[in-house]
Image (spheres, helix red, strand yellow):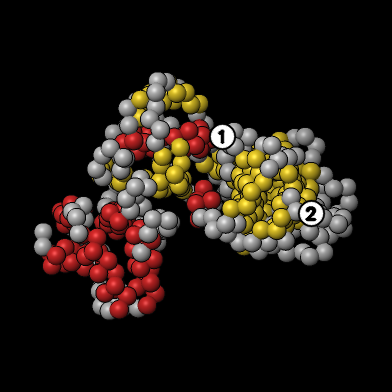
Amino acid sequence: MTQEELKALIDKYLAEELSEQEFHALWTALQEPGSEEVWLDKIRDTWENPVYQGLSDDNKRQEVLEKLLPVLTANAAIPEPAAGRRVMAKLISASSYWWAAAVILMICCAGGYYFFLRSSRQQPVLVTNDTTYKNDIAPGGNRALLTLSDGSTVPLDSAGNQLIHQGTTTIQQNNGQLQYKAAAGTAGIGYNTLTTPRGGQFRVRLPDGTRVWLNAASSIRYPTAFEGKERRVTITGEAYFEIAGNAAMPFVVNIDNRADVEVLGTHFNINAYRDEAAINTTLLEGKIRVKGTVLNPGQQASLAANGQMRVLNDVDTMQVVAWKEGWFQFHTASLQEVMRQMARWYDIEINYQGNIDDVTFEGRMQRDLSLTQVLRILEKYHVRFRIEGKTITVLPG
């Protein structure tokens, strides 16, 4: 394919006019040496001359550039899908990034699920996922158990819509979220606990307006109304917080009775699963204090089991909170790390058999994929799987 023909196909890609045949032609061409330079030239042209169909205004042009530019930078985040489109799941290796731009073509042109993969021993592979294991497992969803202050429990799911009365406090369940409303001057404060199982997630708006997202196999314990000098909650597992402002009553998160996070700002994520090596607290907005150290946005406090803490700078916050947005996202993640996430989300047990290659994973995929679809992706990394009920055995490839 000549450079002129390649440029013409990229033009049609930007205009979202590629046919399926042209998509595969462009896919093939982008694997040829030198094609990345044509791609870069087209990005420069887009920046300087927004003449493509659908790029007549700066907002649309910026949207395209935000999708194209990151995949050409080794340490950048994978671009977001175009709004309203069915994005394709993908994993890419860390060894080569320029050709990952081709993944965007799937976002704009493909129908169904496609996966873009590369391991250290194979060329990029495009796979249409149209086969399943005999025993497929659905992804997790909005499921939780609410334990009230009197010890009674209320099961919650995505279809629920109910009003729960607890003394002078009302709790509204609307689909996958709880919202608390406490009467003014409430006396006799009780505590509630919201617990997600493996394969579950849920959201809660606390009595002060603070919003909390719970990942799978997590919990939060909180009062039905906040009073006194501070607002204190306790979590296990993983949670994302957006704190309601109240300078007179600081917010404190106790992490599984292992550490406290003092909230001086608003948006942060805590990953404190017992099967992970460290408690990772990542700040997205505002300020928080962990063990006397104040974090700024983009920093992460990593607290090891022995109590030692280190602060990481310029953390990829999009990766950290990808679960909240409906994604698995990995950066040089080991197979064991990936499978731990799978175990929590699909409520499965993981066994390993034989000598498994030491592979790492880079990229992202949707959390609403079935387990079969996920395993088909991972199989491209020289591992195989056997499903027996809810037990997954990882085998050498």
Taking 27 as reference, is 135 above or below it? above
Taking 86 as reference, is 359 above or below it? above
What kind of residue is marked 1?
A: Arg
N-term mark: 1 or 2 = 1
Label 1–label 2 contact, CB within 8 A = no
With 45 as the anchor, is 163 left or right in this view? right
Other residues around mark 2 within 10 Å, as few (<14) / some (14–19) / many (≥20): some
| Corner quadrant of residue 371 | top left
Residue at figure coordinates x 32%, y 75% from the top left: 47
What element does badge 1 sit on?
Answer: loop
Q: Name the quadrant of the N terminus.
A: bottom left
What element does badge 2 sit on?
Answer: strand
Mark 1 → mark 2, Cα distance in angstroms: 28 Å
Foreground pick, 47 / 332: 332
Can you give x and y, in whole percent of width and height, for residue 4 in the image? 13, 67
Q: How many marks?
A: 2
Q: Name the quadrant of the C terminus.
A: top left
Dot label at residue 198:
1
Foreground pick, 144 / 277: 277
Other residues around mark 1 within 10 Å, as few (<14) / some (14–19) / many (≥20): many
Foreground pick, 276 / 131: 276
Can you give x and y, in whole percent of width and height, for residue 179 in the image? 68, 53
Taking 271 as reference, is 262 above or below it? below
Residue at figure coordinates x 30%, y 78% from the top left: 48
Residue 173 in view of the camera? no
Foreground pick, 73 / 155: 73
Dot label at residue 231:
2
Can you give x and y, in whole percent of width and height, for residue 364 in the image? 41, 48
Residue 252 in view of the camera? yes
What kind of residue is marked 2?
A: Arg
Can you give x and y, in whole percent of width and height, for residue 324 in the image? 54, 50
| Corner quadrant of residue 76 | bottom left
